[in-house]
Amino acid sequence: MRQLVVQFGLTLAIIIGYSQLSVVQGVDMSEAKLKKVTEECMKQTGVSLEQANLIMKDELENVDEKDFSHNMRCYLHCYHLQMNLTEADGTPISSAYVKFMENRFANKKEKVIPALLKCQHVTDPDKCEFLFKFEMCMAHTIEGQGWEVTK
């Protein structure tokens, strides 16, 4: 029974991840790739399936930072790295990342580039913290919620 629950949760994470990446060109978006990435990042970071699903729901603008553990932030970094959206240090690969964000925020595509220009000033020596702050900045800025870039 536990294995069935884990498999269902993993499938849910894959479906959500697939929907986010479905139109990003140059990225292997196969279900097998997403399953492999999800499993690998869970293994690398110690994130539970429940935490992975929370991350993959793609509602960072609605998440309280205090509820996002360092391991969850590292899962986010791992996922972006494995999907070829960022460099190893968390820096976005411009063309792939812009397409990814335009897909995520399809009804607000015009806000992606201005948000990217603002959020490129986010810094943090910890690659997991950097990517989390960068993603929070992007999500909040695109959604018009404001985000103060801290250096």
Image: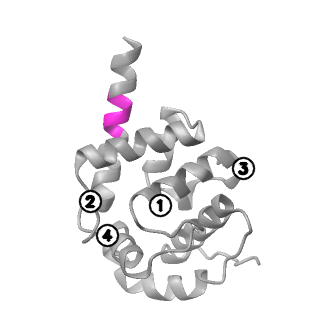
Residue at 70% x, 77% y: name it. 148
Residue 118 in which image quadrant: bottom right
Which residue in the protein does label 3 denote? 66
Residue 25 appears left or right of 47: left
Spatial CA distance of label 3 from label 1 is 23 Å
Residue at 33% x, 41% y: name it. 35
Which residue in the protein does label 2 denote? 28
Spatial CA distance of label 4 from label 2 is 15 Å
Identify the element where label 1 is drawn: helix
Residue at 71% x, 62% y: name it. 126
What amino acid type is highlighted by mark number 1?
A: Leu
Q: Earlier in the sequence, mark 4 or mark 1?
A: 1
Which residue in the protein does label 4 denote? 103
Considering the image in quadrants, where does the N terminus appear?
Answer: top left
Residue at 67% x, 77% y: name it. 122
What amino acid type is highlighted by mark number 4?
A: Asn
Spatial CA distance of label 3 from label 2 is 32 Å
Spot occupied by residue 58 in the image (x, y as percentages of width and height)? 44, 55
Please rate how many residues cluster around mark 2, counting C-alpha atoms within 10 Å: few if below 14, some from 14 to 19, many from 20: some
Identify the element where label 4 is drawn: helix
Spatial CA distance of label 1 from label 2 is 13 Å
Per the rendered image, the range of residues in magenta is 8-12
What amino acid type is highlighted by mark number 3?
A: Lys
Identify the element where label 3 is drawn: helix
Q: Give the number of the disc on residue 81.
A: 1
